[in-house]
């Protein structure tokens, strides 16, 4: 991937992922499932941060992902892809 930007250390992407996870948890603390989808700003912010978690995961080198099989890397990245490309089929209960 050549974006013209200097390569970023993969550890920074992991830190980003943790920050995005923290946001999702804070955005939804104490929110009941039935109220989640009824709040468009909370919903959109949650979806966006989950997308960002998956995008950051794509920048973790394969050797690092393989060395950490306890992290569901493929599922994280696939979730990002589903949210971005299959937005009409998002299951709010799963989200």
Image: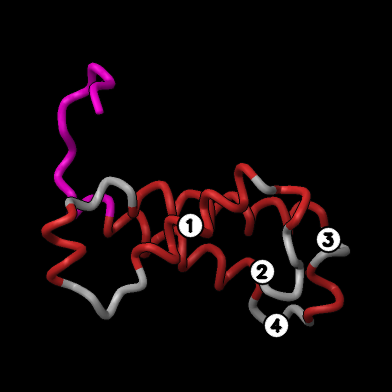
Secondary structure under the numbered disc 3 in the rendered image: loop
Q: Is 31 positioned to the left or the right of 35 in the image?
A: left
Say which residue label 4 marks: 30
Say which residue label 2 marks: 95
Residue extent of the magenta highlight: 1-13
- The residues bearing labels 4 and 3 have C-alpha atoms spaced at a distance of 13 Å
Q: Earlier in the sequence, mark 1 or mark 2?
A: 1
Q: Nearest to the eye among marks 3 and 1: give it.
A: 1
Q: Earlier in the sequence, mark 3 or mark 1?
A: 3
Pick the residue in front: 13 or 60.
60
Q: Quadrant of the N terminus?
A: top left
Q: Are marks 4 and 3 in contact (CB under 8 Å)?
A: no
Q: Nearest to the eye among marks 4 and 1: give it.
A: 1
Q: Nearest to the eye among marks 2 and 3: give it.
A: 2
Residue at figure coordinates x 21%, y 63% from the top left: 65
Q: Is residue 5 magenta?
A: yes
Label 2 environment density (alpha carbons within 10 Å; few <14, some 14–19, many ≥20): some
- The residues bearing labels 1 and 2 have C-alpha atoms spaced at a distance of 13 Å
Say which residue label 1 marks: 78
- The residues bearing labels 2 and 3 have C-alpha atoms spaced at a distance of 14 Å
Q: Earlier in the sequence, mark 4 or mark 3?
A: 4
Q: Is 16 positioned to the left or the right of 54 in the image?
A: left
């Amino acid at each position: 991937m050549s974006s013209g930007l200097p390569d970023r250390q993969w550890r920074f992407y992991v830190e980003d992922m943790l920050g995005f996870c923290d946001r999702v948890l804070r955005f939804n603390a104490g929110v009941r499932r039935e109220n989640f989808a009824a709040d468009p700003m909370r919903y959109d912010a949650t979806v966006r941060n989950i997308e960002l978690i998956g995008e950051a995961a794509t920048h973790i080198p394969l050797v690092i992902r393989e060395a950490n099989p306890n992290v569901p890397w493929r599922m994280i990245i696939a979730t990002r892809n589903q949210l971005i490309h299959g937005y009409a089929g998002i299951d709010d209960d799963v989200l």
